[in-house]
């Protein structure tokens, strides 16, 4: 992965991925005396930035690899991203999902015409099911972040943002497995001479912070954060980039994440999932000091189960 | 009110009101084989189109009128719009609100530095309180829709939309008191030679449909629709314009309104209030037939109480 890789990925996904809008909030800018730009990947196809990396990666497969098909295990945004990208590129895809995954996610994934295989909700069952299919079908495993082309694809988020609003002082991105943050760092350092790149993870899933302190990877053990997209841990590939190019990693509490979501929903009228709100949480909770700065905030996605809310509403009218 | 009045209002609010984004949905366009453009006034200042009419009207007051100050009675978006516009223009404003109004709306209104006076939750108490203040302070009453300059301001929504996306076959707007729909009709007919203008009201507040059939105004009597912004009834001013320039009025049920909200929240990731979702409800429920058409849909606002949803979320993490 590299800045050049990101530029090429940008050409590749251009016109296929959404050029997501950049939003601002007068209230926030006034409150923090800063210019804060939100890059809204909740408006990306499948509702999250993951489509960028997925499409970039699948379109770079050789014809032979495409014939073998791809496989991934995920119940989250990566699964849907692979499903849509595969469907657009006419590649056979298998998604391994835990039996307990939310019905709407299963249906959305199936809706792209891919093959969904269920496993038990344990790491062991997931790996076993996946390995069996790979052995039988020779499918190519597409890891959600331990993959250069995935990271290059995710880097197009910050690339697009900075190309649109100009050089930034700070850019802040959510940090789970590290794919988005690594891409962000490579794009930002490539485009801005003096930018500070900051990753934000939930305190309940602070493997990156602990790993950086220790100097080696210490994974999170079944972290229970509301930010379900950030429960994953770093891999060597992302750890190396983060150590080299990321200026700081900060953590936010569960209530700080919810408060950031509240601001985005109530004031800015956009639906952002918990993982997508951590960058703003770092500003609101003053883990990152915003004053007289030009700041980019990456909103990574907007996929959250709204059924409980609509059930409440419907109860009112029935 | 007139097309020229709308053009002038557009110049007046330009750079002060937000130029709200136009959004699209691949899914919807595919489903209905049409090009559907959403004009998203949920991203307008105060969260609704009402700011346009309020600012246009207040900035047209004479210096003497400005000194006397303005007054309005509303617990909704019009109140906040008047409050913000008055605060920006340095005009004294009094907002009469029922004692039972939601705390967040009261606080938001007070936040603009205007004077809030409470009345009982009856029409009689509201009018009495308002009249007493008008008598004492000689304040100018700013009606939410029975006012030419308000209607011209609201017309800038459709004006901006059509200027951005080009001529449309159909434009659909919510219909409560009629201010937005009248402005929409005047702008649309002024800009497009062959456009169909459609108003949508809740079946539970179908005073416009009944009035059009009867040929005279038949107000809705305390309608109980979830679309709280559309509970108001027509006035002679809006009734006349609607009879002359609006091609059709259709109604949607409560469940159709909620289904449209669901689509906007889940698929498009934007927060839209029930009143703001009725235009899409008319498409989804096939009250307006979309096929091979270029359609503008006006999303009027995004102010809805999200407390119940966040209470559910917080319960999960605490």
Image (cartoon, coloured by chain):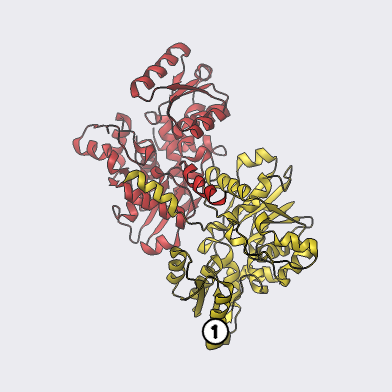
Chain colours: A red, B yellow
x and y percentages locating residue B304 in the rendered image: 51, 56
- In front of the other: A95 or A86: A95
- Left or right of B291 on screen, residue A56: left
Q: Nearer the viewer, residue B285 or A291?
A: B285
Question: Dot 1 corresponds to which residue?
Answer: B132
Foreground pick, B138 / B194: B138
| Residue A168 shows up from this direction | no
Is residue A173 in view from this perspective?
A: yes
The residue positioned 67% from the left and 51% from the top of the image is: B252
SS state under label 1: helix
Q: Residue at x 53, y 51 (%)?
A: A316
- Up the image or down, A76 lies above or below B308; here it is above
Place of residue A224 in the rendered image (x, y in percent of width and height, measured from the top left): 31, 37
Q: Is residue A254 left or right of residue B40?
A: left
Q: Is residue B217 left or right of residue B140?
A: right
Left-right relation of B264 to B168 = left
């Amino acid at each position: 992965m590299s800045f050049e890789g990101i530029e090429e990925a940008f050409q590749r996904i251009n016109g296929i991925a959404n050029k997501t809008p950049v939003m601002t909030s007068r209230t926030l800018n006034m409150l923090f005396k800063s210019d804060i730009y939100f890059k809204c990947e909740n408006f990306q196809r499948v509702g999250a930035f993951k489509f960028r990396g997925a499409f970039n990666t699948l379109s770079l497969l050789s014809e032979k690899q495409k014939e073998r098909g791809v496989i991934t295990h995920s119940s989250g945004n990566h699964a849907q991203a692979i499903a849509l990208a595969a469907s657009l590129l006419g590649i056979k895809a298998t998604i391994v999902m835990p039996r307990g995954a939310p019905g709407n996610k299963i249906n959305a994934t199936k809706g792209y015409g891919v093959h969904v295989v269920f496993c038990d909700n344990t790491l062991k069952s997931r790996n076993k099911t996946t390995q069996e299919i790979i052995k039988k079908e020779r499918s190519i495993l597409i890891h959600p972040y331990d993959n250069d082309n995935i990271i290059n694809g995710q880097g197009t988020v910050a690339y697009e943002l900075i190309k649109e609003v100009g050089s930034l002082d700070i850019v802040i991105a959510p940090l789970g497995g590290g794919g988005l943050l690594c891409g962000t760092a490579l794009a930002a350092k490539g485009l801005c001479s003096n930018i500070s790149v900051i990753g934000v993870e939930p305190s309940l899933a602070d493997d990156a912070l602990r790993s950086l302190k220790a100097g080696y990877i210490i994974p999170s053990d079944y972290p229970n954060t509301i930010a379900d997209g950030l429960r994953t841990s770093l891999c060597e590939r992302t750890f190396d980039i983060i150590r080299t190019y990321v200026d700081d990693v900060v953590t936010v509490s569960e209530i700080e994440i919810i408060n950031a979501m509240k601001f985005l929903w109530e004031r800015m009228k956009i639906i952002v999932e918990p993982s997508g709100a951590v960058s703003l949480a770092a500003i609101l909770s003053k883990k990152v000091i915003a004053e007289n700065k030009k700041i980019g905030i990456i909103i990574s996605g907007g996929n959250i189960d709204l059924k409980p809310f609509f059930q409440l509403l419907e109860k009112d009218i029935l």
